[in-house]
Amino acid sequence: MNKVIAQGIGAAVLAASVMIAPALLAPPSFTAAQAACEPGDVLDKTTAEQAKKRAESAGFTAVRMVRKGCDNTWHGTGLKGGAPVTTAVSASGQANQEGD
């Protein structure tokens, strides 16, 4: 009986290892943004927090960065003059209301 239990536990451990291995072995810099990018696109290391600070410096408030595009532009939401807007912070650090 103990041999059957040990085999069952061994099989469960093996199954769990197979399921989590891709997550553990994937390159650490792989992100959802990179998954949508072209093979030649290079993503910089700017963070959502850095982009948020740039947007706030440009006069946006209640800023929330949502995603980073393949062109290294951060896209988010915020307020400008009390009105809700979408904002973009370019790779060069320039913050604008989207559509401007």
Image: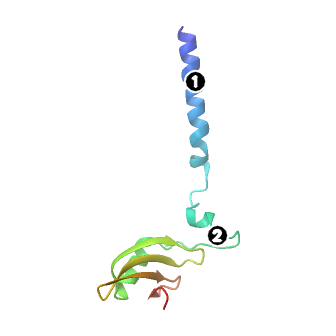
- Residue 70 lies, in percent from the top left, at 60, 74
Indicate whether 50 appears above or below 81: above
**Kind of residue indicated by mark 2:** Cys
Q: Residue furthest top?
A: 1
Residue sitting nearer the eye, 79 or 7: 79
Q: Residue at x 58, y 36 (%)?
A: 17
Residue sitting nearer the eye, 48 or 86: 86
Indicate whether 2 appears above or below 15: above
Q: Residues within 10 Å of mark 2 (few under 14, many from 20)?
A: some
- Cα separation, mark 1 vs mark 2, equals 40 Å
The residue that label 1 is drawn on is 10
Mark nearer the viewer, 1 or 2: 2
- Residue 55 lies, in percent from the top left, at 39, 83
Q: Badges 1 and 2: C-beta atoms under 8 Å apart?
A: no
Give residue 63's mark: none
Q: Residue at x 57, y 48 (%)?
A: 23
Q: Residue furthest right?
A: 39
- Residue 39 lies, in percent from the top left, at 70, 68
Residue sitting nearer the eye, 83 or 96: 83
67 relative position to 10: left or right: left
**Callout 2: SS:** loop
Q: Residue at x 59, y 40 (%)?
A: 19
Indicate whether 59 appears above or below 19: below
Q: Residue at x 44, y 76 (%)?
A: 76
**Callout 1: SS:** helix
Residue sitting nearer the eye, 99 or 90: 99
The residue that label 2 is drawn on is 37
Of the numbered discs 1 and 2, the one sitting upstream in the chain is: 1
- Residue 69 lies, in percent from the top left, at 56, 74
**Kind of residue indicated by mark 1:** Gly
